[in-house]
Image (spheres, grey):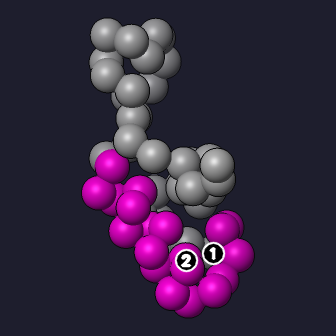
Amino acid sequence: MLPIEAQDRGRGRRPEGSRKIINGIFWRLRCGTPWRAVPPRYGNGNTIYRRFRP
């Protein structure tokens, strides 16, 4: 669930903050809404889902 270290992750955008993503996962599980309905303050719903799924 936690992002890869900067030197090991390659190029591209910097990963979102882990605390924000985990709070988004908890919010979604508590409310039972679809991933796309997670408020933007927790980050992109697709990003949160990708970190959640095994």
How many numbered callouts? Answer: 2
Q: Is residue 8 left or right of residue 19?
A: right
Left or right: 31 as drawn, with respect to 53: left
Image height check: is 7 above or below 22?
above
Dot 1, how many residues are within 10 Å of its Cα: few (below 14), some (14-19), or many (20+)?
few
Quarter-wise, where is residue 31 in the image? bottom right
> Which element carries disc 2, helix, strand or loop?
helix
At 57% from the left and 56% from the top, the residue drawn is: 52
Residue at 64 percent of width and 49 percent of height: 54
Q: Position of residue 20 (x, y in %)?
A: 34, 59
- Residue sitting at x 39%, y 12%: 8
Where residue 26 appears, as percent x and y from the top left, is 45, 75
Determine contact: label 2, label 1, CB under 8 Å: yes
Q: In the image, what residue occupies the spot 70% across and 76% down?
A: 34
Residue 46 seen in this snapshot: no
What's the amino acid at mark 1?
Answer: Ala
The residue that disc 2 covers is 28
- Label 2: few (<14), some or many (≥20) within 10 Å? many
Q: Which residues are magenta?
A: 18-36
Q: CA distance from mark 2 to mark 1?
A: 8 Å
Tell me residue 42's x, y (percent).
41, 64
Q: Which residue is mark 1?
A: 37
Q: Is residue 8 magenta?
A: no
- In primary-sequence order, the first of circles 2 and 1 is 2
* Vertical relation: 39 (above or below) 33: above
Amino acid found under the numbered disc labelled 2: Arg
Dominant secondary structure, magenta: helix
Judge left or right: residue 5 versus residue 49.
left
